[in-house]
Amino acid sequence: VQATKIDYRDLVARGVRVLNSAGAMHMSGHLAVRDAEDPNVLWINSRISSRSTLTAADVLPYDIRAGRRIGAGDEAPSEVHMHSAIFALRPDVNASVHTHPEYCVALSIAGIALQPVFVAAAFLPEIVPTFDDPNLIQTRERGDAVARVLGDGSAVTLRGHGVIVVGGGIDEVVARTVMTEENARLQTIAASLGKPIKVLGAADLAISRPEICSPHWARKHTHYHEEVARTRGVIT
Ligand SMILES: [Zn+2]
């Protein structure tokens, strides 16, 4: 039996719409997915497309080593370098999201590191690293620098700018992106109550990670957001 070929254009378009419906995409965010048949290729929404009505025609293939889109048409987002640098450095990463979620950005502006405080965000490292530079990631060198700060983790915050979240596949990265902002919101609310906050420490993360990093967790969360998007008429 021959496996069905994955339609990456459709996959990315749906993923972006679902993320936007969940409030986690922003007008200039992007979702990149690695091509399973050619690990040097990623698929990403175009620079100019509206993230709210994205279609398969707005998704393009990008050559990671060459650092340019494949074929003619709309260009990749100017900050595609984050995704390409991380995909080059991390063979375990097959999907990544860059977006500008307000609680994550607010914490970075306040100089407070994002930390897992909610058990469903146990995929995050104990202290999420910050790329301490608010300017856009529009060169390969800056993309490499972000990838180095990410290290082997699941997320990095970009001060005064946004986040990049990575996963083993599209389900995982969609679920993680939404949850990263939910965690940031909870951390902000808890910190504003005026007492020292209780974060998930290394021992807690060791207990919770196997469940939170399982494929069924990612599918369940992403399925929930897909169904919310479907009932809103955002996807069919
Ligand atoms: Zn950005």
Image (cartoon, grey):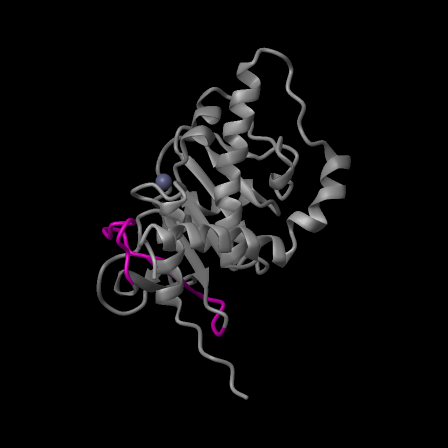
x and y percent of residue 156 in the render? Answer: 52, 39
Magenta range is 37-55
In the image, is 57 to the left or to the right of 91? left
Depth order, front residue of 229/176: 229
Reply yes or no: does residue 232 show up in magenta.
no
* Residue shown at the point (31%, 43%) measured from the top left: 28
x and y percent of residue 130 in the render? Answer: 52, 32
Outermost residue, top direction?
194
Which quadrant of the frame does ligand 1 lie within?
top left
Quadrant assignment for the C terminus: bottom left
Depth order, front residue of 197/29: 197
The part of the image, by quadrant, that contains residue 198 is top right
In the image, is 126 to the left or to the right of 28? right
Whether residue 167 is visible: no
Q: Is residue 204 above or below residue 231?
A: above
* Residue shown at the point (62%, 30%) measured from the top left: 117
In the image, is 146 to the left or to the right of 120? left
